[in-house]
Image (cartoon, rainbow, N blue to C red):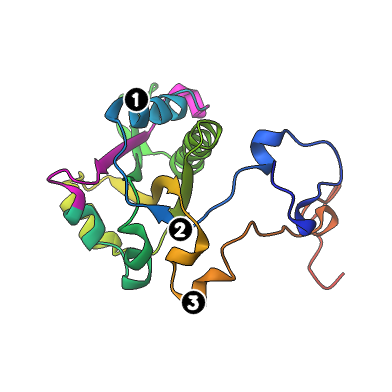
């Protein structure tokens, strides 16, 4: 279990939640495709508005033809450590649905929220199986959209970098001290009864 001093919850939180964090140090090892699909299976069971399930998971494994292409869309900083990972999964979702009342296309305002829920389940499933996952938004979204051959009504939200965690020594010196679980804001800063409270209150 993760025991970083600033990760002590105010009340009991499931270990699977506290143990999940986002490393950057990875061993350059392959992942069995069935293991990866098992993580994505967890995402399939996320809740979504009207059970529309707008998410899609587009993935590539290291040492396969798509790997370098998926890496190429990352900003240089992320590529510098993600290239040692075992898989990259781009999380996308459809922004349009067909209205059950009119049969016409209409905006789906919850698509990103629903895709985020699916992403978290993937991360928890992988973490429980002994794999590390680092979600990132640092990539060229336009290039990824085109490279994934997405329809215009789909949006790219994030990429999940998945791999076997390595010792922090594999990272550049400037990243080694950051290679630890991070804390969170106090609950009273994010949970309010009745109405929103600005940070300065």
Mark 3 or mark 2, which is nearer the start of the sequence? Answer: 2
Label of residue 173 in the image: 3
Label 1 vs label 3, nearer the camera: 3
Q: Position of residue 64 (x, y in %)?
A: 16, 43
- Few, some or many C-alpha atoms within 10 Å of disc 2 (few <14, some 14-19, many ≥20)? many
Tell me the CA gap for discs 2 and 1. Answer: 50 Å
For residue 18, side relative to residue 198 (left or right) = left
Instruction: Tell me the magenta residue range.
Output: 47-67
**CA–CA distance between discs 2 and 3?**
12 Å
Q: Quadrant of the N terminus?
A: top right
Nearer to the camera, 55 or 163: 163
Q: Position of residue 173 (x, y in %)?
A: 49, 76
Q: Residues within 10 Å of mark 1 (few under 14, many from 20)?
A: few
The kind of secondary structure element at disc 1 is loop
Q: Earlier in the sequence, mark 2 or mark 1?
A: 2
Q: Is residue 43 magenta?
A: no
**Residue wearing tag 1:** 102
Indicate left or right for 132 with 87 as reference. right
Q: Would you name the residue on which mark 2 appears? A: 25
The answer to the question of whether label 1 and label 3 lie on touching residues, with beta carbons closer than 8 A, is no
């Amino acid at each position: 279990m993760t025991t970083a001093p600033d990760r002590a919850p105010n009340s009991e939180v499931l270990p699977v939640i506290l143990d999940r964090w986002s490393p950057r140090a990875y061993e350059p090892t392959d992942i069995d495709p069935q293991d990866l699909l098992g993580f994505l299976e967890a995402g399939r069971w996320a809740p979504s508005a009207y059970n529309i399930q707008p998410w899609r998971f587009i993935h590539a494994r290291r040492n396969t033809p798509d790997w370098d292409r998926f890496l190429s869309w990352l900003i240089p900083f992320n590529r510098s450590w993600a290239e040692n990972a075992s898989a990259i999964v781009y999380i996308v979702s459809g922004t349009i649905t067909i209205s059950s009342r009119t049969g016409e296309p209409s905006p789906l305002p919850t698509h990103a929220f629903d895709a985020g829920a699916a992403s978290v389940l993937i991360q928890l499933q992988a973490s429980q199986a002994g794999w590390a996952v680092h979600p990132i938004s640092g990539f060229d979204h336009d290039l990824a959209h085109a490279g994934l051959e997405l329809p215009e009504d789909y949006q790219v939200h994030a990429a999940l970098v998945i791999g076997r965690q390595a010792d922090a020594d594999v990272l550049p010196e400037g990243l080694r001290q950051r290679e630890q679980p991070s804390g969170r804001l106090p609950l009273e800063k994010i949970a309010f009864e009745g109405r929103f409270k600005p940070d300065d209150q």
